[in-house]
Amino acid sequence: QVQVVESGGGLVQPGGSLRLSCVASGTIFNIVTMGWYRQAPGKQRELVAVITRSGITNYAVSVAGRFTISRDNGKNTVSLQMNSLKPEDTAVYYCNIGRLGLDYWGQGTQVTVSS
């Protein structure tokens, strides 16, 4: 089993920044991908950014150039630096861990962008 815990959400004004962090624990060998998804009210969960063990990244078009994903394989952590935040970035953000064909999710952290 893999336990996933996120932190770092909150309320920020448009144009501001937030940093989300996620740590994986438990049976954590063979983690392949680490990523962030988000779900806004009334919408489906969507990919925000993902990073492979070797550091290859992929971003949603809507966040490319504003968000940066990074990971520390030694500490089993993944972070999401979010800059130039917009009201449409408001959502619950979930950390995702991909391991041996299975997905593990955190409980989610709320990000609200509002003036």
Image (cartoon, helix red, strand yellow):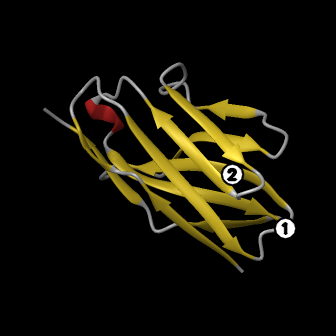
Left or right side of 91 for 73: right
Between circles 1 and 2, the one closer to the viewer is: 1
Amino acid type, residue under disc 1 in the picture: Phe
Extreme left residue here? Answer: 115
* Residue drawn where x is 63% and y is 48% of the image: 35
Q: Which of 88 and 30 is in front in this view?
A: 30
**Can you say whether 15 is above or below 98 in the image?**
above
Residue 64 drawn at (x, y percent): 54, 23
Q: Nearer the viewer, residue 25 or 86?
A: 25
- Residue under circle 1? 29
Residue 3 drawn at (x, y percent): 62, 74
Q: Which quadrant would residue 74 be assigned to in this image?
A: bottom right
Amino acid type, residue under disc 2 in the picture: Met
Extreme bottom residue here? Answer: 1
Which numbered circle lies on residue 39? none
Element marked by disc 2: strand
- Residue under circle 2? 34
* Residue drawn where x is 13% and y is 32% of the image: 115
